[in-house]
Image (cartoon, coloured by chain):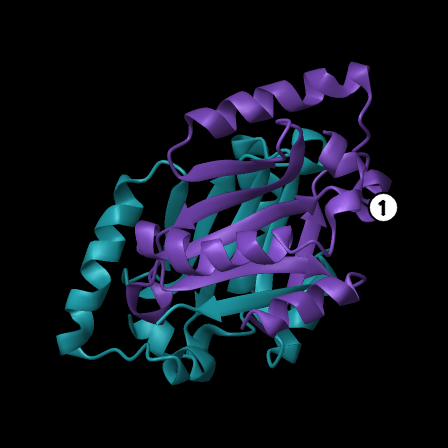
Chain colours: A purple, B cyan
């Protein structure tokens, strides 16, 4: 929760780190932990404080000749640790180790159009921004 | 396979409807059918010929206050049936019925930057193109 709130775009979407909000996140966390297609990864520092997180979803599919995809969501690095190389190490681990372990031929993610630094970061790692990401808010 | 090949962008990515290619798709289809987070929907015409397909993946998550997402992939409508209203009926069903049934607060998809007609189509349905979609090809 702190890592979500420690990001101006997420905070604007309602992710604040307030005690009363815990109830909104706990059921989602329980479901995530029991779901074999989803993993939430947490990076901690030397005193076990969380400094970064991300969610990976393995998605089998038919297109691109039956390719399995690895979807990356909710990449968040604590503001004081940004530009320290943690994000880059996490993403390199995804496109090498995690992709190989899950048999994924494609790693994909979307990033808010406003996050221009993040776009350059993904491009440096070899991602190509070929797509436009659309969202439909149900409620 | 025919629906994937009946699309110039997919065909360029290697999705052709050739008999020998069946082996590439069958394991993916089997895995999809046994995975409770994923559904592949097939729309057939009055003589049971497939005319459209799409894949839905239900993804629990922490961001946006623990929101569950419904990811739409591989929306394909047979070329002779495009502009017939099938795609629009499918997407309206996703953002109403499927989202409610799966408890999703957000429906999301990415569309190739080259598919400008598709972007206008999604915007008419109420989708907002706030994100950029990045892909990393593992092989």
Say whether residue B21 is left or right of residue A22. Answer: left
What is the quadrant of the N terminus of chain B in the image? bottom left
| Label 1 secondary element | helix
**Image coordinates for residue B5, horizontal then vertical, percent:** 34, 78
For the residue pair B45 and B3, the one nearer the viewer reads as: B3
Question: Which residue is rendered at x = 77% and y = 61% of the image?
Answer: A115
**Image coordinates for residue B80, horizontal then vertical, percent:** 43, 79
How many callouts does the rendering have?
1
Q: Quadrant of residue B113?
A: bottom right
**Image coordinates for residue B41, horizontal then vertical, percent:** 39, 51
Mark 1 neighbour density, 10 Å: few (under 14) some (14–19) many (20 or more): few
Say whether residue A131 is left or right of residue A104. Answer: right
Q: Quadrant of residue B47?
A: bottom left
For the residue pair B133 and A41, the one nearer the viewer reads as: A41
- Reply above or below: B97 against B9: above
Say whether residue A133 is left or right of residue A78. Answer: left
Q: Is residue B62 visible?
A: yes
Q: Quadrant of residue A134?
A: bottom right
- Reply above or below: A75 against B114: above
Residue of label 1: A8
What is the quadrant of the C terminus of chain B in the image? bottom left
For the residue pair A68 and A5, the one nearer the viewer reads as: A5
Question: Which residue is rendered at x = 20% and y = 79% of the image?
Answer: B18
Residue situated furthest front in the rendering? A46
**Image coordinates for residue A84, horizontal then vertical, percent:** 70, 53
Question: Which residue is rendered at x = 28% and y = 45% of the image?
Answer: B33
Q: Is residue B124 visible?
A: no
Chain at tag 1: A
Say whether residue B87 is left or right of residue A62. Answer: right
């Amino acid at each position: 929760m702190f890592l979500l709130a420690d990001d101006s775009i997420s905070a604007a979407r309602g992710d604040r780190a307030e005690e009363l909000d815990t109830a909104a996140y706990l059921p989602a966390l329980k479901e995530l932990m029991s779901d074999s297609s989803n993993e939430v990864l947490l990076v901690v520092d030397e005193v076990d404080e969380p400094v970064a997180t991300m969610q990976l979803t393995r998605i089998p599919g038919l297109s691109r000749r039956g390719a399995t995809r690895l979807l990356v969501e909710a990449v968040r690095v604590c503001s004081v640790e940004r530009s320290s190389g943690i994000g880059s190490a996490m993403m390199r681990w995804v496109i090498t180790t995690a992709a190989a372990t899950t048999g994924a031929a494609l790693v994909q993610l979307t990033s808010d159009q406003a996050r221009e630094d993040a776009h350059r970061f993904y491009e440096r790692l070899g991602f190509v921004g070929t797509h436009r990401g659309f969202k439909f808010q149900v409620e």
